[in-house]
Image: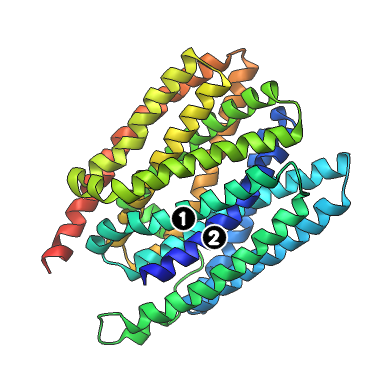
Amino acid sequence: MVAWCWLVVFSLLSSYYIMRPIRDQAGVAGGVQNLQWLFTGTLVAMLVLNLPFAYLVKRLPRRRFIAITYHFFAANILVFAALFHVSEGAQAVWVGRIFFIWASAFNLFVISMFWQLNVDVFSPEQGKRLFGLIAAGATLGAIVGSGVTATLARHVPPMVLLVAAAGLLEVAVFSAGHLSRLSTTLQRQPHAAAVEAPIGGSVLAGVTRVVRSPYLLNVAVFMLLFSITSTFLYFQQAAIVSGAFRDRAAQTAFFATVDLGVNVLTLVVQLFLTARVVLLLGVALTLGLLPALTIVGFGALALVPTTMAIAVFQVVRRAADYAVARPSRELLYTVTSREDRYKAKSFLDTVVYRTGDQLGAWSVALLRVVGLGAAQVSFAAIPLAALWLVNALWLGRRQERLAAPRQEA
């Protein structure tokens, strides 16, 4: 099953990282001062997409709603490929803005669905051993995708890259179907076929179950603070890069190079450290590593707001997120019900995450309106990261207590 997991997530991340530098350049091309509006549009897109997704989860078996969702996004990619090919000037800027919103929604949905499938298949103990290894497949895909764009961005039009991204997404559909069928046959429960039955429940269960559960509410706080600090960092990067590079192809190549550095470092950590870190430190301390690193990183960026500083901070922070924090965060859902793994998790990974984007984007805009510079904006993110650290430690300890009876059984 791990091999099929690898192929699914390799294809997904290759597809996304081919598109990510195009998305980031589109955000800069539309004007850094307008980025907060793009984040608002992304939140609206998340809200619009969540209800039909919840309906599919309610009515269809896992294998079918995953395939339908991925096919839908692949078709969207081909539409954008055609639009980029025929648009120019101001029209191209607006196509880029729409693509920015769409790609930001695409990323969260497809990756969230992959991890929903994983936490449904593997136990908490299996997750500790295997999630880091599975995440390495994501990193390899990201390296390939970002490497392709970093190499070809100056030589081929976006249309060619997007067609390749759509093809990779179809590979993910094929692989996810095989993984879903295989996981059903390997279930240890006596009525394994029930796992593939529709989950049922209300289409609004993702919201109501989060509100009623202190544990899931704290997961929501974790996602909000993670997203807010990520957005602070993204806006700092956009401002620095737009001032340092005037050529659009150079901006795209810079973003792709940063992505490549992130994923090479991530792969090294995943292959040699992730499982050891989680098993040695436990979930609580492992979850606390990224907030602690964020405190240090914003402090350094406040003192040295340069392209080198932003590149190093992005590479180290995102590598820590992908290699350590993300697998640990997925362990939080291994102690929840199956309905929560699909509905509540989807709501948290998409709507709550993008709400954090909104809070971060408009907070940065407000801080700049009142006259704060890059250093002051970085300092303002430090207390948020400290609160995030406290929340991460509580969540990790709670997960360990909830997982203990399952391990004893």
Q: Residue furthest left?
A: 408
Q: Where residue 51 sits in the image (x, y, percent)?
A: 58, 63
Whether the residues at callouts 1 and 2 have beta carbons within 8 Å, the answer is yes
Does 168 sit left or right of 262 as displayed? right
How packed is label 2: few (under 14 Cα within 10 Å), some, or many (20 or more)? Answer: many
- Which residue was labeled with disc 2? 12
Q: Quadrant of residue 116?
A: bottom left
Does 334 sit left or right of 80 as displayed? left
Residue type at numbered disc 1: Ala
1 or 2: tag closer to the N-terminus: 2
Q: Quadrant of the N terminus?
A: bottom left
Q: Give the secondary structure at mark 2.
A: helix
- Which residue was labeled with disc 1? 138
Answer yes or no: is residue 322 visible: no
- Number of labelled discs? 2
Q: Quadrant of residue 187?
A: bottom left
User: At 69% from the left edge and 33% from the top edge, which residue is drawn?
Assistant: 251
How packed is label 1: few (under 14 Cα within 10 Å), some, or many (20 or more)? Answer: many
Q: Where residue 50 sits in the image (x, y, percent)?
A: 57, 60
User: At 52% from the left edge and 14% from the top edge, which residue is drawn?
Assistant: 375
Is residue 26 or residue 45 the one in the foreground? 26
Compute the Cα span from label 1 to label 2: 8 Å
Q: Where residue 331 sits in the image (x, y, percent)?
A: 31, 55
User: At 74% from the left edge and 36% from the top edge, which residue is drawn?
Assistant: 249
Against 286, residue 28 (above or below) is above
Answer yes or no: is residue 386 visible: yes
The label number, if any, that marks residue 71 in the structure image = none
User: At 47% from the left edge and 53% from the top edge, which residue is drawn?
Assistant: 140
Against 88, residue 403 (above or below) is below
Is residue 374 or residue 320 the one in the foreground? 320
Residue type at numbered disc 2: Leu
Q: Give the secondary structure at mark 1.
A: helix
